[in-house]
Amino acid sequence: MLKIFNSLTKKKENFKPVFLNHVNMYVCGVTVYDLCHIGHGRTFIIFDLIARYLRYCGYTVTYVRNITDIDDKIINVSYKKHKCMNFFVNSMINEMHKDFTELNILPPDKEPRVTNYIPVIIQMITELLNSNHAYISKEGNVFFSVDSDINYGVLSGQFLKYLRSGKRICNKGIIKKNKLDFVLWKVSKKNEPYWCSPWGKGRPGWHIECSAMSRDLLGKTLDIHGGGSDLLFPHHENEISQSTCVNKSIYANYWIHSGMVIIKNKKMSKSLGNVFFLRDILNKYDSEIIRYYLLSTHYRQPLLYSEEVLKQSSISLIRLYRALYSTNYKDTLFRHSIFELEFRNAMNDDFNVPLVFSILSNLAKKINVLKIQKDSIEVNKLASVLCFLGNQLGLLYKNPHDFFKKQTKFQKIDITTIEKMLYIRNNARKLKNWTQADNIRKYLFSLDIILEDNQNDTFWYSIKK
Ligand SMILES: [Zn+2]
């Protein structure tokens, strides 16, 4: 049975959807004011993997991932770039889709944009005002009142008690009853885009969009609500509070949060100036290597990003492809092996992909041994399993011949030089001159060329484009 770590209860729990065979999953998507960075890549590969695995388990899944296409940053950046906001937002959404497609992230079933849901959002804010969970400030902004919800803080924990304050505060001229109160409807300033509402011209605050869109598209109670762990507070806390107050039902049964990307012991963030954009990494490395790497650390753990770690991780993917090379795996689809059972056990334990990777690696080793024994029937059977299980993670979908063949030109070294060095190295290996053979391997590795030896041959692969 699938067990999921629920951020709400801080426990691994058996997964049971509301309806027997159907799963509703809502994941907070991208605010489209810039290109996507590696943190987005990680989060959305993880939820893509979760949707794929739920489908593998036999569930039908409705996966909704929203797009925040109106907020202060979008307004500021499009203004600074002298671009019409709509044009700017559409181009950013196109770029996001390009990156996600390259990373083999399947499109969600629905991808609502906030600006298409303004009436639905206005409706929910009206319900919150009517039930005294919200109030209108002097300036005309509508705020959610956290004091109206005795359960506020249920997701982010006790520390919130210390943050609570009954005093009125004035921040940049905005007066709130409690400093944790958050804006549901914001009065638009001069020259800002706006929509008409019962409270005047304005636009929705961030948190209300997910509560309103998820209820409209998936109903009052979600099976799974997900997002990056940076959204836990205040975004998800605020979503829970407003949805529960208005719907009088549980908002989401399982909360899943993916870990952050860490660079040199620091969280990746725009304010620290250490953001790596997916586009730059995709221009340098094979997209499947990036996907493999982003899945290689358990989804709840922080992921250390460095090109050195990425390079190391790529060796493992290359080994899997090498095992598939020159096998006839597509002809004999062999399912329900012991390896598939191990795969399911690992995935059922809160999506333990690092353990799955070690299962795939063992499978590859076994295939290589069988190749030496020239047991082609067993080789093909196990290669089918390897390919099938890799596919469940969105990996190993390329023809291995194409995977190894596609490279034609590199910046640091040309193919003739690589072949010459391999010839020298093979002679050194025959003469058992391991030091020379190893030095050549290390030298080529420093140029991003990875060597994989088998009994009669050496494969080489450049991880950089
Ligand atoms: Zn959200």
Image (spheres, helix red, strand yellow):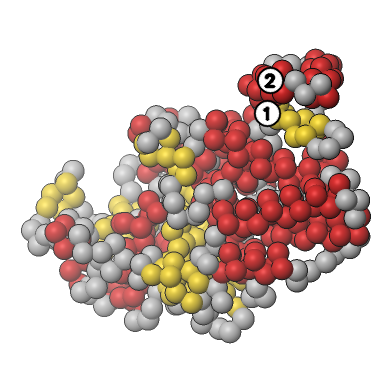
Categorize mark 1 by other alpha carbons within 10 Å: few (<14), some (14-19), many (20+): some
Based on the displayed image, in which of its 4 quarters is residue 186 positioned?
bottom left
Mark 1 C-beta to ligand 1 under 8 Å: no
Mark 1 belongs to which amino acid? Lys
Question: Where does residue 397 sit, x and y in percent of width and height?
Answer: 77, 51
Q: Is residue 23 visible?
A: yes
Q: Secondary structure at mark 2?
A: helix
Q: Which mark is residue 435?
A: 2
Which residue position holds label 1?
A: 464
Q: Secondary structure at mark 1?
A: loop
Question: Where does residue 193 sit, x and y in percent of width and height?
Answer: 41, 47
> In percent of the image, x 39 and y 29: which residue is there?
273
> In percent of the image, x 60 and y 40: which residue is there?
313
Q: Is residue 444 left or right of residue 68?
A: right
Q: Is residue 322 above or below residue 419?
A: below
Question: Where does residue 204 sit, x and y in percent of width and height?
Answer: 37, 57
